[in-house]
Image (tube, helix red, strand yellow):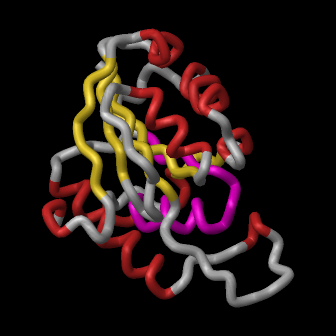
Amino acid sequence: MKTLIVVRHAKSSWNEPGTNDLQRPLNKRGKKDAPEMAKRLRKRGFKIDLFLCSPAQRAFATASYFADEYNAGKKSIAVEEKLYNALPDSFYEVLSTLSDEYKTVALFSHNPGITDFVNTLTQVRVDDMPTCAMYAVTADTNKWISFEDAPRLFLFFDYPKNMAGS
């Protein structure tokens, strides 16, 4: 079995006009939500083998909060260029290249692609992946290259304003 936890980056700042999109940092709410969502994930009992994120600063910062919660540190985060402005096919392509040693992967990326991607995973649909939302599935396979075609089971969907998730 493979487990995938898809996380949209936390709320980012638009306070500095002219900032390159890749360089936008998290805002105050993002810095509050990311550690809270990381705690919620850890409480669910998942052991994360790989933190995989887009090269955007806001995605890396979000992944860093999760890695810190798991005492893994920033060095445990793999940056993948293809996760920036990714379409669903790009997500599957990235996953297919992962080492099979990873059982559970947390993947950090952006809208609109991340919402489109999670809506291909199971019959459970979401209208929008809010900032710092998590959508998790398991796949009945031992190989990431088979993830796209493997039967998948929805595990949970959670987001910062979901009081039931805390």
* Drawn side of residue 136 relative to residue 10, left or right: left
Residue 87 sits in which quadrant? top right
| Magenta span includes 55 | yes
Q: Position of residue 98 (x, y in %)?
A: 55, 25
* Residue 149: x %, y % from top left: 46, 10
> Which of the two residues, 149 or 79, is positioned nearer the viewer here?
149
- Judged left or right of residue 119, residue 80 is right
- What residue is rendered at 46% in x and 52% in y? 128
Q: Is residue 27 above or below residue 59?
A: below
Please tell me which residue is depicted at 17% across the width and 69% down the height of the picture: 163
Question: Residue 100 location, x and y as percent?
Answer: 45, 19
- Considering every residue shown, the one lying at the far front of the view is 127
Q: Which residues are magenta?
A: 50-67
Quadrant, the N terminus: top left
Rendering coords of residue 44 (x, y %): 16, 50
Left or right: 40 in relation to 11: left
The residue located at (67%, 41%) in the rendering is: 86
Tell me where residue 152 sits by quadrant. Answer: top left
- What residue do we see at 59% from left, 53% from top? 110
The answer to whether residue 83 is magenta is no
Q: Which is nearer the eye, 30 or 122?
A: 122
The front one of 16 and 124 is 124
Query: Of helix, strand and loop, which mostly describes the magenta segment?
Result: helix
